[in-house]
Amino acid sequence: RNFFQHISEHTSRMSDEDVIVFLDGDDWLAHQNVLLHLAEDYYRNTSCWMTYGSLVYFPHGIASISPPFPPSVVQSSSYRKFEWISTHLRTVKFKVWRNLREEDFRGPEGRFLDMTV
């Protein structure tokens, strides 16, 4: 199975306001309140549809903080044409996910991408 199929199989009963959290198998959350923080500070109190964040490289403790997308990218919705800046932890409301198509996860030759952003 590919990434799209795996996520799609597990989201069949979600509603538009539910949130999907993408946590890779080799990653972990920084503390036990990370999801609570996302729910209360981003999704419950704002019109946020997705998040991307920062990470700390283990065991060195070096932080990698994602910069915001430039206003021109946001206004034109040209995220896919801009350089990759979205890193862990990534989350998205189901209403965004349900509008993605399987072909959005395929490269020009029709194979599923090894990585997606």
Image: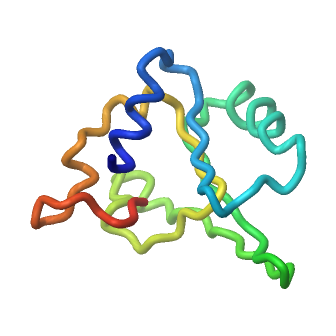
91 or 76: nearer the eye?
91
The residue located at (33%, 39%) in the rendering is 5
Looking at the rendering, which quadrant does residue 61 occupy?
A: bottom right
1 or 37: nearer the eye?
1
Residue 100, horizontal then vertical, whole percent: 31, 38
Looking at the rendering, which quadrant does residue 26 occupy?
A: bottom right
Task: Identify the coloring.
Answer: rainbow
In this view, 85 is above or below 46 = below
The residue located at (33%, 61%) in the rendering is 80
- Please state if 35 lies on the left or on the right of 9 as rendered: right
Looking at the rendering, which quadrant does residue 57 occupy?
A: bottom right
- Please state if 102 lies on the left or on the right of 26 as rendered: left
- Please state if 97 lies on the left or on the right of 103 as rendered: right
Which residue is at the far right?
A: 32
The residue located at (64%, 68%) in the rendering is 66
In this view, 99 is above or below 84 = above
Which residue is at the far left?
A: 109
